[in-house]
Structure formats: structure tokens, C-alpha cells
Amino acid sequence: GESVGLHLPTLSVQEGDNSIINCAYSNSASDYFIWYKQESGKGPQFIIDIRSNMDKRQGQRVTVLLNKTVKHLSLQIAATQPGDSAVYFCAETTTGTASKLTFGTGTRLQVTL
Amino acid sequence: SAVISQKPSRDICQRGTSLTIQCQVDSQVTMMFWYRQQPGQSLTLIATANQGSEATYESGFVIDKFPISRPNLTFSTLTVSNMSPEDSSIYLCSVSGEGRPHEQYFGPGTRLTVT
């Protein structure tokens, strides 16, 4: 079936640097792409989303880029902080699927001091 | 955003027994979901909990193994039946935002260990 996956299982970044987390997806019919952050022992937390008719969206310290040509999604975190250490998941959903999310495999972001 | 609580937060159960997990939301929501997250892995949707009707299960999940109740718009339960060690996972409920169904809010999860 359709799937959403990630390139790197673990990303180590120095505090203050920018982080880039990547995700590949295969369902060209997806309407929304979403990034979630999951800290240890907690449920996933919504970070930012992007609709399929956009190629860039910015939030507070985060930017999501969507390249539909190569079916690639990325999350950029500016000035990475220790509190950004977590597992990040991309997810996708399609209108008409009753809001069902398909999650990628996850990338662990480790922020070093 | 909705505030979601789950009970229990964790449990250790013997194989062959059943555990019912509760999910409570602080506001009425239309869509509620149950996910499983196996150790070190991503989230897999088990089912959509429908208020007033039977849950909608994803491929690989069946009602006999994971019966779900949704008696009202703020509460749902998931039962893991006849447990085996392979059922050891984190079980999470989520709700979707009104008007933004793709933006889901998750509970803290229930960590289940089956011995």
C-alpha cells in the first residue's frame, strides 16, 4: 500500500545549528502533510502542516518544504535547542479517508551541547 | 487544542488476559482514533472510534481482538483481548481538530507489557 518513510533514523546536531529532517512519501493523492514531535514517554505533538498545493510553510523556528515532483518533504528547525531533542514523524492524509493519518518511520534528533 | 487523558498510563499483564484502556477528552470531538506504537517504531492506526456505531478497523486489526466502545463524544475505550507478548506496545488515542481534521491531538499513551 501507500507509505510514508524517512531517510535517516538518527540525526545529531549541535546546539544552535539548523536541523533538517527529511521524509519521502509515495501517495501522490495526499492532501496534507504533517510533522509531529514525540518526546520520550509522551504522545506525538503536532508541529506544523502543509497542504499539497503549497511548497513552503513557516512557523515559529520551523519551516516545512514540500517537493511534489520528487515526493519529498522536509522539516527545518532553526537554531536547534536541547528541547528539540525528540523523535520526529512525518504523516500524510488524504481527503475522504476520514482523517486517517499514515505515519513515517521516524527520525530521532539528538542535540549536542 | 483538546486535552486528552488515558488510563492506565502503564500496565503489566499476563498472557491470555484482557486490558481495557480509557481515553477521555475535555471537549466534544467528532473523530477519535486508536493507534499502536510498538517499541522503537512508528504509529499504526488500529481503528476509528465512531460515536453511536461500530468502530472502523484498519487492515490487520479485528474487533474480536481490539473491541472499541465510543458511548459519547468525549470518551472511548480500547480493549486488548487475549493478550500475548506481541501485544506489548504503547497504545495511543487521538482526536482530530474541528475544522482541521488532519491536525490530530494525542493522549500520553498507555504502555502495555505482556508477560
Image (cartoon, coloured by chain):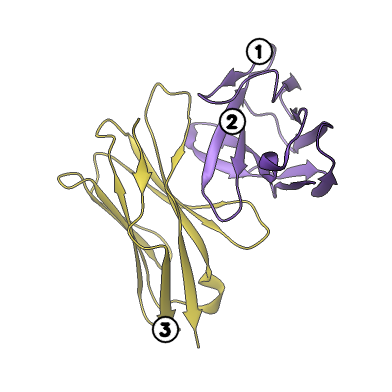
Chain colours: A yellow, B purple
Q: CA distance from mark 3 to mark 1?
A: 49 Å
**Are discs 3 and 1 less than 8 Å apart at CB?**
no
Left or right: B5 as drawn, with respect to B56 = right
Are the residues flagged by discs 3 and 2 from a single subunit? no
Q: In the figure, is residue A28 to the left or right of B81?
A: left
Looking at this rendering, what residue extends furthest in the bottom direction? Answer: A113
Query: Circle 2 is placed at which residue position?
Result: B46
Image coordinates for residue A101, horizontal then vertical, percent: 46, 36
Which circle marks residue B54 in the picture? 1
Chain under label 2?
A: B
Q: Of helix, strand and loop, which one carries label 1? A: loop
- In the rendered view, tell whether residue B58 sits above or below residue A36: above
Q: CA distance from mark 3 to mark 2?
A: 39 Å
Could you give the CA–CA distance between mark 1 and mark 2, rounded to whole angstroms? 13 Å
B26 and A23: which one is in front? A23
Outermost left residue: A69
